[in-house]
Amino acid sequence: MARRQPDLLLLDLMLPDGNGLDYCRELRSEKATANLPIIMLTARDEDTDVVVGLEVGADDYLTKPFSPRILMARIRAVLRRHQAAEASGGDDIIVRGPLRIDKEHFTVTLEGTPLTLTRSEFNLLRLLARRLGVVFSRDRIVDAIHGPDYAVTDRSVDVLVVSLRRKLGAHSGLVETVRGVGYRFRTDTEQA
């Protein structure tokens, strides 16, 4: 998980090399994985086990045996809730591959190294990273960053993107051009 954060984690309580509850606590205490959706899968089905699992940070708790269809339905439900929370703008910290964006502290780190971004670059990067794979037109970018009454040309957005890519260096491919349409954040962040 140090190289690439998964979309969701299935975690058993009884593991050969540790306790799932301890792993869950550790994941919740780390900023990079604090919001990672976690479903606990376990044979421990006592009420207290379920309550403790949910209280230490699991988003859902499923006892064995279970059907694969129920597991898939639970995974989809947890991912839906997680994606809805991200889309609502309540995500103060966004982690996408090597990139970490912290809205509250106005910081961006790339592979642990702080980047110095302008306010517009920060807002553009955050806008794109919040909505993986969604293509934003230049007009939509201007509206989101500056508001609908801000007068800029299409070229101004292109210059902003070039500047942001320069600061992303070897990871400049995270901001992808969709010819004739606009820009998006790449979803395959491991290769960017």
Image (cartoon, rainbow, N blue to C red):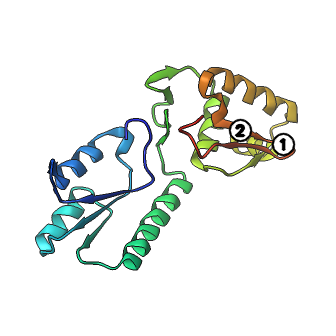
Write down the quadrant of residue 43 in the picture. bottom left
> Which quadrant of the view contains residue 31?
top left
Q: Which residue lies most toward the front here? A: 16
> How many dots with numbers?
2
Residue 156 to residue 128: above or below: above
Measured as percent of width and height from the top left, residue 9 is found at 35, 55
Q: Position of residue 169 (x, y in %)?
A: 62, 21
**Residue at figure coordinates x 46%, y 63% from the top left:** 79
Q: Which mark is residue 87?
A: none
Q: Which residue is mark 1?
A: 179
Is residue 147 found left or right of 41 in the rendered image?
Answer: right
Query: Badge 1 local density, few (<14 within 10 Å), some, or many (20+)?
Result: few
Which quadrant does the C terminus fall into? top right
Q: Amino acid at mark 1?
A: Arg
Q: Provide residue 190's location: percent of width, then percent of height.
A: 53, 38
Q: Which residue is mark 2?
A: 176
In the image, what residue occupies the spot 67% across and 30% down? 120
What residue is shown at x 28% (from left), y 60% (from top)?
58
Secondary structure of the residue carrying tag 2 is: strand
How crowded pointer 2 is (Cα within 10 Å; few <14, some 14-19, many 20+) is rated as some
Report the front residue among 39 and 103. 39
Residue under the image location 68 percent in, 52 percent down: 134
Q: Is residue 131 left or right of residue 179?
A: left
Picture layout, residue 19 above or below residue 169:
below
Q: Is residue 98 above or below residue 62?
A: above
| Alpha carbons under labels 1 and 2: distance apart | 9 Å
- Residue type pointed to by label 2: Glu
Question: Looking at the figure, which quarter contains the N terminus?
Answer: top left
